[in-house]
Image (tube, grey):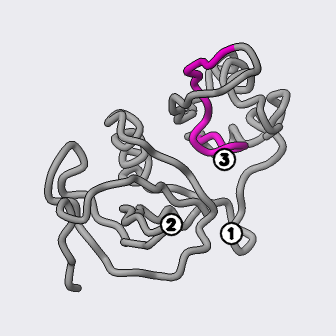
Amino acid sequence: MKSRAEKKIADRMARFGLEYFLPTIKVMRQWSDRRKLVEVPLFNGYMFVRVTPEEFTTVRMVEGVVNFVKMEGKYAILRDEQLEAIRTFVATGLPVAAAPADFAPGTKVKVTFGPLKDFEGELVEVKNEKQFVVRLEAIHQVLLVNLPAAYLEKVDY
């Protein structure tokens, strides 16, 4: 998808009657004369669509769509619970950021308190902050949420 055109592409998807999900977050942006809270896509250049094989061509015809994400030659598919996790993270209002999924595997943890209670992920150290990480392998992205270490417990598998 064309970078920085996600919202326009979402409007076009709606006109085609396609089911899509564009997770967005609010961030403070600074201009020379003002600061403003703006809504931006959580994953730059990514949008999630639920399509049948027959609709693949329709999606590709939407102006601005470049391609589908592929892993090992197959279309990347997110499970419903992964999409629901993204919706929940965004809805909490907690600071959330997306980053490339190039972290080394860490300790498996579970959130024990707050609106994300019972979510599981991996704990990583970034700039000396403990962050709760939900790894979304299908799109090579992870969600990073700042949580106090006291909200986490180790999960043994």
Q: Quadrant of the N terminus?
A: top right
Tell me where residue 30 appears, x and y as whole percent. 67, 26
Using the image, determine if residue 146 lies above or below residue 45. Answer: below
Foreground pick, 24 / 74: 24
Q: Which mark is residue 127?
A: 2
Identify which amino acid the numbered label 3 is placed on.
Pro
> Which of pointers 3 and 1 indicates the residue nearer the eye?
1
Residue visible at 75% across and 70% down?
73
Which of the marked residues, 3 or 2, is nearer the chain's N terminus? 3
Identify which amino acid the numbered label 1 is placed on.
Met
Residue visible at 41% across and 81% down?
106
Foreground pick, 7 / 16: 7
- Whether residue 76 sits left or right of residue 157 in the image: it is right
**Helix, strand or loop at mark 1:** strand
Quarter of the image holding residue 89? Answer: top left
Around disc 3, counting alpha carbons within 10 Å, would you say few (fewer than 14), some (14 to 19), or many (20 or more)?
few
**Helix, strand or loop at mark 2:** loop
Q: Which residue in the structure is indicated by mark 3? A: 53
> Which of pointers 3 and 2 indicates the residue nearer the eye?
2
Q: Is residue 40 magenta?
A: yes
Foreground pick, 111 / 131: 131
Using the image, determine if residue 78 lies above or below residue 87. Answer: below
Looking at the image, the residue that sits furthest to the front is 33
Quarter of the image holding residue 130? Answer: bottom left
Q: Which mark is residue 144?
A: none
Rounded to the nearest whole Å, what is the CA distance between mark 3 and mark 1?
A: 17 Å
Residue range (magenta):
34-48
Around disc 2, counting alpha carbons within 10 Å, would you say few (fewer than 14), some (14 to 19), or many (20 or more)?
few
